[in-house]
Image: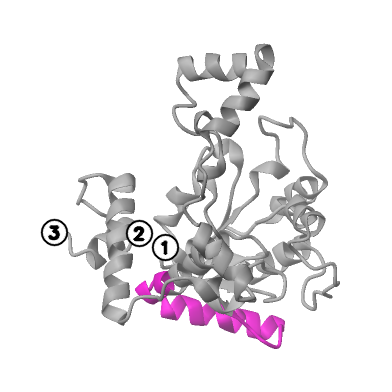
Amino acid sequence: MSTYDELFGAYGSGFQSLKIHIVLLFSEQIDWVKFLINFCHKANGSSYNFRVHPRDFPNKRDSGMSEQALLLSDVFKLLPDNCSVNYPSDNISLYDIMEEVDVFLNGHSTTGVEMTFFGYPVVLYDPHIVHYPPDLNFFDPDITAEGYIKKIDEALNTGWSFENIRKAYRWLDLWHNKISVDMADALPFYDYIGSSSFSFKIFNFLSRHLFKSFGKKFRIYTRPNRLKNTERILDFFDKGHENLAFNFQQSPETLEKETGYIKKNFEYLYEIFYGNDRNAKKDSLHFRLKEILGYK
């Protein structure tokens, strides 16, 4: 589930157009939750978990409950036996949940991309309210309650797939690499190299507060004469491209090469998640990644 502060931030930053989209199916997120609870009453043989957003409930920054949290708490009092709620106080990570599920139902959270990236089918009730291409997920183009239920069934029948990973990988590559440019080398080196060490913290404090003139000169001195991506930036303006993707390197020539690149990245993720552990529970994410990587 999502929080409305994410939408507020998207509109305030200009990332989301101020053009109003009338949500045809559920005017508020609580209406979506009520619909799903009613659906759960009729869904025999399936279990559903509602994961609330941590910022809606008491957390390190705010000890109070949001208005949405109060509404949800009231609605969750009438859950059927095949439904459960994951609260922040449970200390259960989304990645823990990811090991046990078959499909994700998403409102407008970018978690929909993340779950697709890990191979899971994701279902949207409205394709117009997410901040990524809805084609990554399942949705009913007519935005009807009946169509939404059918898409949930379709996603369950389709199941986990490496092709979901491929779709999300392509989108993330476009978003983070092809239409963006890395300018990290423009930062003073002590802002990102060794910044966690005690000596660099002292140096940073002195240069910023006690010896400001020296600090400014040192910042200029440590900047590179040219950014590593200077040519790409100049090419963008010289040729009048619509966006940076037009002057980026080509994607892999073959599907096999792309598959190899993706699996290489997932070898790294597997090591982070599981280390050398090969004892995976069947149908868990651990098991599925182990299978596609060919680990014994």
Q: Please, is residue 185 above or below residue 112 in the view?
A: above
What range of the chain is rendered magenta?
139-166
User: Could you tell me which residue is drawn at 78 percent across and 60 percent down?
Assistant: 14
Q: Is disc 2 surrounded by few (<14), some (14 to 19) or many (20+) residues within 10 Å? A: many
Q: Position of residue 196 (x, y in %)?
A: 48, 24
**Which residue is the extreme one toward the top?**
210
Which residue occupies the foreground of this view, 250 or 282?
250
**What's the mark number on residue 296?**
3
Q: CA distance from mark 1 to mark 3?
A: 20 Å
Determine whether the residue tagged by mark 2 lies in a helix, strand or loop. helix
Per the image, the residue denoted by label 1 is: 118
Q: Quadrant of residue 124?
A: bottom right
Q: Residue 158 colored magenta?
A: yes
**Which residue is the extreme one toward the bottom?**
142
Q: Is disc 1 surrounded by few (<14), some (14 to 19) or many (20+) residues within 10 Å? A: many
Contact (CB < 8 A) between labels 3 and 2?
A: no
Per the image, the residue denoted by label 2 is: 285
Main SS of the magenta part reads helix
The amino acid type, in three-letter code, at marker 1 is: Phe
Contact (CB < 8 A) between labels 1 and 3?
A: no
